[in-house]
Image: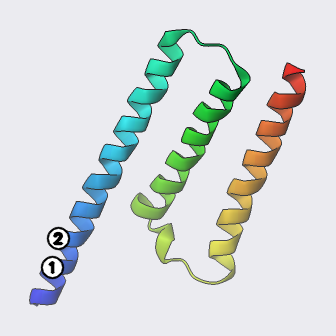
Amino acid sequence: MKESVSTNLLTSRSALLVYLVLVTLTVLTWLIGMSGVEALWVSLLVFAMALFKVHLIGDYFMQLKQVRGIWGLVIVIWLSITAILVSAAYIFSAS
């Protein structure tokens, strides 16, 4: 019984920490947008932060961190392909 309480507390702390990271990244993205900086690397940085947020939400709030085997790999591959294709399209359209 005591072990499940400590596990729930750890899970709650992890969820709170992830939530604070998500809020921080969201505010940082908003600040970057409001600053008016228009550079390719800034856009790619904002996109990378968005992908990281997707990863955090999937792992901690959709419980995808516990997925084993091929399904965990599918998630990583999907995120990687999305990142590569969108980044490549953005880079090629900027040049």
Please say if 48 is above or below 61: above
Quarter of the image that includes the C terminus: top right
Pointers 2 and 1 in contact (C-beta within 8 Å): yes
Disc number for residue 16: none
- Does residue 30 appear to the left or right of 13 in the view shown? right
Q: Amino acid at mark 2?
A: Leu
Determine which residue is flagged by label 1: 6
Query: Circle 2 — which element?
Result: helix
The quadrant where residue 12 appears = bottom left
- Does residue 8 appear to the left or right of 49 in the view shown? left
Residue 63, percent from left and from top: 44, 68
**Neighbour class for label 2 at 10 Å: few (<14), some, many (≥20)?**
few
Residue 47, percent from left and from top: 63, 35
Query: Circle 1 — which element?
Result: helix
Residue 90, percent from left and from top: 80, 29
Determine which residue is flagged by label 2: 9
**Neighbour class for label 1 at 10 Å: few (<14), some, many (≥20)?**
few
Q: Amino acid at mark 1?
A: Ser
Please say if 82 is above or below 14: above
